[in-house]
Amino acid sequence: MTPYITYAVFAFLFGAVVGSFLNVCICRMPSGESVVSPPSHCPKCDYQIRWYDNIPILSYLLLGGKCRSCKTPISIQYPLVELLNGLLALALFFKFFPQRLFAEGVPIQYLFTGMFYFGVLFIFCSALVVVTFIDLEHQIIPDRITLPGIVLGFVFSFFIPQLGWLNSLIGIVAGGGSLLLIAWGYQVVAKKDGMGGGDVKLLAMMGAFLGWKSILFIVFVSSLLGSVIGVTLMLIRKKDSTLAIPFGPFLAAAAVLYVFYGRQIIHWYLNMGR
């Protein structure tokens, strides 16, 4: 195994280990519990999970998806979150650490720059994983994620020349303001609430991390995804237009798409028909 592949495997394992902690956040944040204590335990029998039963993905497979003590089935969410976060970390590794970066003679500051960008967007993507799973189950987006995220994204912008603090600040205002305007317009037309304040804060956080140029892309793609999937679900379940579908996961998916392919997609779109 080459050193580059070894680093890539380590990035995936690192992401999966963090994903294990994200599961704790997903389970405890909606009820306002601490994500630090008590230690991880079975919600059915309170069996304290040992370290060897807490190895990301692997422990779930070895235990057959059941608690070692009471044999209660463990939600597939746990290995899914670990796998997803591991894959996100791996994708970020390939984005910021191309193989040529490890060639001899490459200035060491490029590696440090890659590590910083990797760290910033890894925090961002991990936060989106937590938001997605909480919103899917509870239809809420915790302020404990978005409000610190807005501040953190803005602080990071001072150290990212490609972003810049002004771009980040405009992104916060544009992100939160655009959804606030859409929510107000929907309320005026439909005479009911169609979007929660959590979505507004989430898009403001995205603007803080990605800048104002990302907002139009994220709003357009998330609306497109939401419309397609929403209509499909209503047809399958034969429900009417009042079916409540959380919008946070669509925003998160659009933001991740922007992180990896946003500029390429925008460039392709602007050059269509030329």
Image: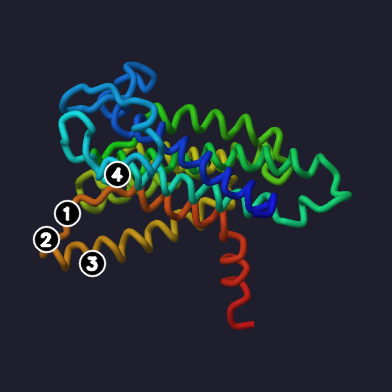
The residue indicated by pointer 3 is 232
Q: Quadrant of the N terminus?
A: bottom right
Q: CA distance from mark 2 to mark 4?
A: 26 Å
Tell me the amino acid under the disc marked 3: Thr
According to the image, label 1 marks what residue? 243
Dot placed on the residue nearer the N-terminal end, 3 or 2: 3
Query: Going from the N terminus, do you reach mark 4 or mark 1 first?
Result: 4
Q: Is residue 108 left or right of residue 139?
A: right
Residue 50, percent from left and from top: 34, 25
Q: Is residue 221 above or below residue 206?
A: below
Q: Earlier in the sequence, mark 4 or mark 3?
A: 4
Q: Earlier in the sequence, mark 2 or mark 4?
A: 4
N-terminal label among 1 and 3: 3
Q: Measuring from the top left, give residue 45's x and y in whole percent.
A: 16, 24
**Amino acid type, mark 2:** Lys
The residue closer to the viewer here, 33 or 100, is: 100
- How far apart marks 1 and 3 lie (CA) works out to 12 Å
The local secondary structure at tag 4 comes to: helix
Q: Mark 4 = which residue?
A: 77
Which amino acid lies under the numbered mark 1 shown in the image of this protein? Leu
Q: Is residue 210 left or right of residue 107?
A: left
Residue at image position (40%, 46%) is 179
Describe the element under mark 3 as helix, strand or loop: helix
Do the CB atoms of the residues marked 1 and 2 lie less than 8 Å apart? yes
Q: Nearer the viewer, residue 189 or 48?
A: 48
Give the residue at mark 2: 239
* Labels 4, 1: front one: 4
Q: Position of residue 98 (x, y in %)?
A: 70, 55
At horizontal 61% and vertical 65% (from top left) the residue drawn is 264
SS assignment at label 2: loop
> Is 99 left or right of 193, judged from the image as shown?
right
Q: Name the residue rendered at 46%, 41% in the picture.
A: 16
